[in-house]
Structures are given as structure tokens and as C-alpha cells.
Amino acid sequence: MYSDASLEDDVLDLNHKVQMLQQQVGVLAENQVNSDDRFSRVKQDNAAYQERVVMLEEQLRETELRHEERHAEEQRRNRELITRIEREKQLTIENYTIKLSSLEKEKNSIDDDCKRSKALVDKLQKEKASLEDRVSEAEFSASALHQENAKLAELSRREKEEIKVERERSAQVIEELRCEIERLRTAEETARKRSPSVDPQTAQSAELQATIKQLRDENKNLVEQVEDLQAQLLTSRLEEGRTLVTATNNNSLAAEFEAMTNEEGALYGSDTVEKLKKSLKDAQEANHHLRAYIDGILLNIVENYPQLLEVKQKKY
């Protein structure tokens, strides 16, 4: 039989165990509640994940569908692009074939034109040489004419000086004769007052007057003859100069340039044509300067010595 002390110990021990069991039951209950909460949350999360998976699957299907449509559209565009490129390539080949044929024809035409141009250039070079010879001759003639004009001017100056000296000498002689006539006239008047008879000095005075008149006439004739000869010589030289300047040749290069068509001018070559035109221009300028020089001489004669032209006109 157990004693009371051992029973109390057993009761206390049982109470302690009961308390421990109660605590464990409380902990288990709390754990159960926590587990239920976690399960509920997990269940909710799972439902949300399921919805998201469904939504993502729908998006995936839509994306795949759009991708297939876009892929089909790209293939269609690529086929159209390839077709257009093939068509353009064919057209380009045809165009280049036509251009090649045209260029070959143009090349043949250019070869023919080059042959004609070469022959024409040779001809123009010969004509250029001939023109240069004519220009040289014209320059030489102009130089000779200039020298002749200088000689003519010097001769005219000398003749004018001689005429001037002769006029001064004639004027001096006339003045001396006039003084002598006045002296004789005075003596005659004095003699008349002295005697009514005829004084021998009257006959001498009449003779002197006749001599003076004759000298005046001879001097006038000499002056007219000199001026007439000057006018003839000057007119002859000027006519020769004008004939030299204005003379033209029917086969000159200027006439050929006028008759040249645009197509022929293009075939000659721009450099050759320009050189020939420059040579022609130089020759024309030389002729122009010569003509201006002769016109200046004529103008100088008209302004300073119009009597030469008047004498010439009277002669004609």
C-alpha cells in the first residue's frame, strides 16, 4: 500500500504532466491555426497564379497569332518586292541594251565625223597659212603705205615751205613794185602840174603796172599748179590705200566662215576654229587701224588744207 506522501507526489507529477500536455495541446492548436492560415494564403496565391497562367497562355496565343500574321505579311511583301525587283532588272537590262546599241551607232558616226574633221582641219590649216601670208602682205603694204604717206607729208611740207617762201618773195617784189609805182605816180602828178605835155615816166609807169600784173598772174598760176599736183598725188596715194584696205577675196576665210553651217563649225574643233577666228580678227583689226589712219589723214586735210580738195574738184 502506498503512503499518502507518495500519492501526493504522484498527483503532483500527474498535474505537472497534465499541464505540460495542455501546453503542448495549446501549441499544437496554435500551430494548427497558423497552418490553416498559411494553407488559405497558399490556396489564394495558387488561385491567383492559376488566373495569371491562364492570362499568360491567352497572351501567348495572341502573340503567336500576331506573329504568324506578321510573318505571313512579311512573306507576301517579300514576294512582291522580289517580283518588282525582277521586273525592274529586266527593264534595266533592256534599257542598257538599247543604250549600248545607240552608243555603238554614235561611236561609228563620231569615227566618221573625226575622219571628216581631220580632213577639214588640214584644209583649214592650209587656208590659215594662206591667210597669214595675206595678212603679212597686208601688213607689209600698210607699212609701205605708211612710209609713202610720211614721205608725202614731208614732200607736202617742203613744197608748202617753198610756196610760202615764193609767196613772200613775190609779195616783197610786188611791194617794191607798188612803192615804185607810187613813187612814179607821185612824180607823174608833179610833172602834170608842171607841164601838160606827156612825161616819159608815164609810159614807164604803165609798163611797170603791166609787169606787176603779169607777175601776179604767173604767181597765181604757179600756186594753182603746185596745189593741183599736190591734190593729184595725195588723192592717188589715198585711193591706193583705200583699195588695199577694202579689197576682198571671194575665197577668203571670212567668206567661208559666213557660209559655214553650225554643224560644220562643230565638226572643225573649237580650238582650231577659235585660232582661225583670232587670226581673222587680228587681220581685220590691222585693216581697221589702216583705214582709221587714212581717214585721219583725210580729216586732217579737210580741216587744215581744204584748198587741196577744192583744187581737185575744180580739175574734175
Image (tube, rainbow, N blue to C red):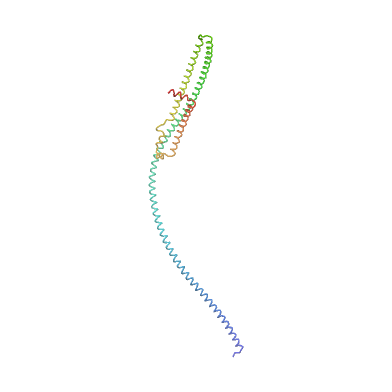
Camera-nearest residue between 200 and 137: 200
Q: Quadrant of the N terminus?
A: bottom right
Residue 82 vertical placement versus 161 (above, below): below
Camera-nearest residue between 78 and 118: 78
Position of residue 173 measured from the top left corner of the image (x, y, whole percent): 52, 17
Residue 243 vertical placement versus 175 (above, below): below
Residue 311 falls left or right of residue 34? left
Examine the image and state in which quarter residue 236 appears.
Answer: top left
Residue 262 vertical placement versus 167 (above, below): below
Camera-nearest residue between 59 and 112: 59
Examine the image and state in which quarter residue 86 appears.
Answer: bottom left
Total tally of numbered discs in the picture: 0
Position of residue 220 measured from the top left corner of the image (x, y, whole percent): 48, 19
Position of residue 44 measured from the top left corner of the image (x, y, whole percent): 50, 73
Camera-nearest residue between 180 and 316: 180
Residue extending furthest right? 5
Q: Quadrant of the C terminus?
A: top left
Examine the image and state in which quarter residue 313 appears.
Answer: top left
